[in-house]
């Protein structure tokens, strides 16, 4: 197995996301860095920092040049960053030394890499925003369709009280809406230009340094922070935390689905489930299992990203390298989790008969709380509780189901099964209504 599933023809279908991974290739990074170098030269030419003819030449060449990542490998390994190799290759490709000498004027490697990364992450988050919206809509449709479908709610793995399948689906969907709302702030915090020069002071650009940074930000559609942020990693840490939160919510959906499809319950069916090599009767919940695995892995990687926030002094290669090792993996796995959750949401079918059986199993004891409060409307609650405990003991002893025993003793008591769902149907419909449909 390759070190990264994104590089595996065998496993990428399980664990990788093609659209997200495409923004974390060598070619994508190089193209983004060339764009930044070209636009930097253009705005420097406009401000008189470098000659206008050189600026125009570099800007045009940045959009035309093709640089082989393999040709940069040795110099990157030596320098610890790819930008010196990029500058070397770009200058050579321009074949115009009088212009090429103004390339990368006053910037440092981290400026070029992180501004290029901001451009790529902006595209990543735009992609994910659409997926979050589509997932919320799919869950909203499912919640509305099954708002009144009763099933057993389970706490600590035990049947507790009735709920509705629509309410369960809504519990998967509410976090999706919140994560999407938070994404806007995360995206704004990351859509920031980096231009500080060697130690964050822009000294090589002279008095036009701040204006250059502002112009570069405007030209790229990014925000000018007004200062260097080389060692300020809180925004990238917040993005990592956001990703961990997203996959945790999606992983909870996966955990629920694994239990809902397990033998003995079978309360939902997932079309296209996996098969066993030796047991033809099995339909393995591969998708939900992958969703859980992705969640656990991204959550583990998030700790490394937070540790990478400990940047020493004005710039820190060691901490920065940890981000390189971690962030692309987190993004690709998160992208896959979002795509997979959306796919699963369109392949889930509840099984009402199995859900009814889950409610009836255990002699109907799941309705004990409901019946206790029904009795408490006609007698003191302690007396109602004592009566219900006695009925439960008889039901567990095999004398009959709890609903039958209560009905026999209190024939005039209204035992409406729908009342046992409480607010579940209303909550399912409220979630569905809160989701903006196309």
Image (tube, grey):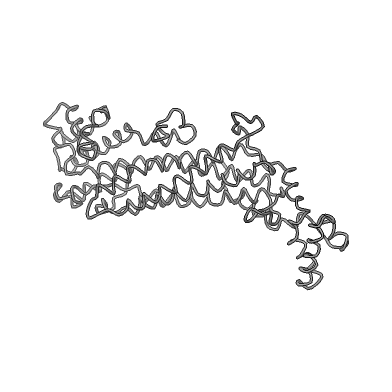
From the viewer's perspective, is residue 115 above or below residue 28?
A: below
**Residue 422: where, in percent of width, then height?**
70, 58
The front one of 161 and 361 is 361
For the point 67% across and 41% down, the residue is 263
Is 426 on the left or on the right of 418, as rendered? Answer: left
**Residue 182: where, in percent of width, then height?**
45, 52
The front one of 363 and 34 is 363
For the point 49% across and 34% down, the residue is 14
From the viewer's perspective, is residue 3 above or below residue 298?
A: above
Quadrant containing the C terminus is: top right
Question: Residue extending furthest left?
Answer: 98
Is 341 on the left or on the right of 328, as rendered? Answer: right
Residue 286 in view, yes or no: yes
Quadrant containing the N terminus is: top left
**Residue 267: where, in percent of width, then height?**
68, 43
**Residue 168: where, in percent of width, then height?**
63, 50
Residue 162, image quadrant: bottom right
Residue 64 in view, yes or no: no
The front one of 68 and 372 is 372
From the viewer's perspective, is residue 306 above or below residue 10?
A: below
Is 387 on the left or on the right of 335, as rendered? Answer: right
Q: How many marks?
A: 0
From the viewer's perspective, is residue 420 above or below residue 34?
A: below
């Amino acid at each position: 197995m390759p070190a990264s599933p994104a590089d595996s023809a065998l496993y990428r279908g399980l664990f990788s996301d093609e659209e997200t991974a495409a923004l974390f290739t060598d070619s994508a990074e190089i193209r983004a860095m060339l764009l930044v170098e070209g636009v930097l030269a253009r705005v420097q030419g406009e401000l008189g920092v470098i000659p206008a003819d050189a600026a125009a030449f570099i800007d045009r060449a940045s959009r035309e040049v093709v640089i082989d990542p393999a040709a940069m490998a040795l110099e990157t390994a030596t320098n610890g960053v790819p930008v010196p190799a990029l500058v070397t290759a770009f200058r050579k490709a321009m074949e115009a030394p009088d212009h090429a000498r103004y390339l990368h004027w006053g910037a440092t490697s981290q400026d070029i890499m992180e501004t290029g990364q901001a451009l790529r992450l902006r595209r990543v988050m735009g992609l994910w925003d659409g997926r979050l919206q589509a997932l919320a809509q799919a869950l909203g449709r499912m919640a509305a369709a099954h708002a009144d479908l009763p099933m057993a709610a389970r706490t600590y793995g035990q049947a507790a009280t009735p709920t509705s399948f629509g309410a369960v689906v809504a519990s998967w969907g509410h976090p999706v809406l919140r994560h999407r709302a938070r994404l806007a702030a995360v995206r704004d915090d990351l859509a920031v230009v980096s231009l500080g020069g060697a130690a964050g002071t822009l000294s090589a650009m002279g008095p036009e340094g701040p204006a250059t940074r502002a112009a570069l930000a405007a030209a790229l559609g990014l925000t000018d922070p007004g200062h260097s942020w080389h060692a300020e990693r809180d925004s990238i840490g917040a993005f990592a935390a956001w990703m961990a939160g997203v996959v945790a919510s999606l992983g909870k959906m996966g955990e629920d689905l694994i239990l809902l499809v397990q033998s003995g319950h079978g309360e939902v069916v997932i079309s296209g489930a996996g098969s066993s090599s030796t047991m033809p009767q099995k339909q393995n919940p591969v998708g939900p299992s992958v969703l859980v695995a992705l969640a656990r892995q991204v959550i583990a990687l998030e700790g490394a990203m937070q540790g990478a926030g400990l940047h020493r002094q004005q710039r820190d290669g060691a901490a920065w390298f940890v981000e390189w090792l971690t962030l692309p993996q987190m993004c690709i796995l998160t992208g896959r989790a979002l795509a997979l959750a959306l796919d699963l949401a369109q392949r889930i079918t509840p099984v009402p008969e199995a859900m009814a059986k889950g409610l009836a199993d255990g002699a109907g004891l799941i309705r004990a709380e409901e019946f206790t409060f029904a009795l408490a409307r006609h007698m003191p609650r302690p007396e109602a509780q004592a009566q219900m405990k006695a009925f439960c003991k008889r039901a567990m002893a095999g004398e009959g189901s709890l609903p039958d025993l209560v009905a026999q003793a209190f024939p005039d008591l209204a035992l409406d099964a729908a009342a046992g769902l409480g607010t579940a149907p209303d909550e399912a419909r409220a979630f569905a209504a809160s989701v903006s449909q196309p």
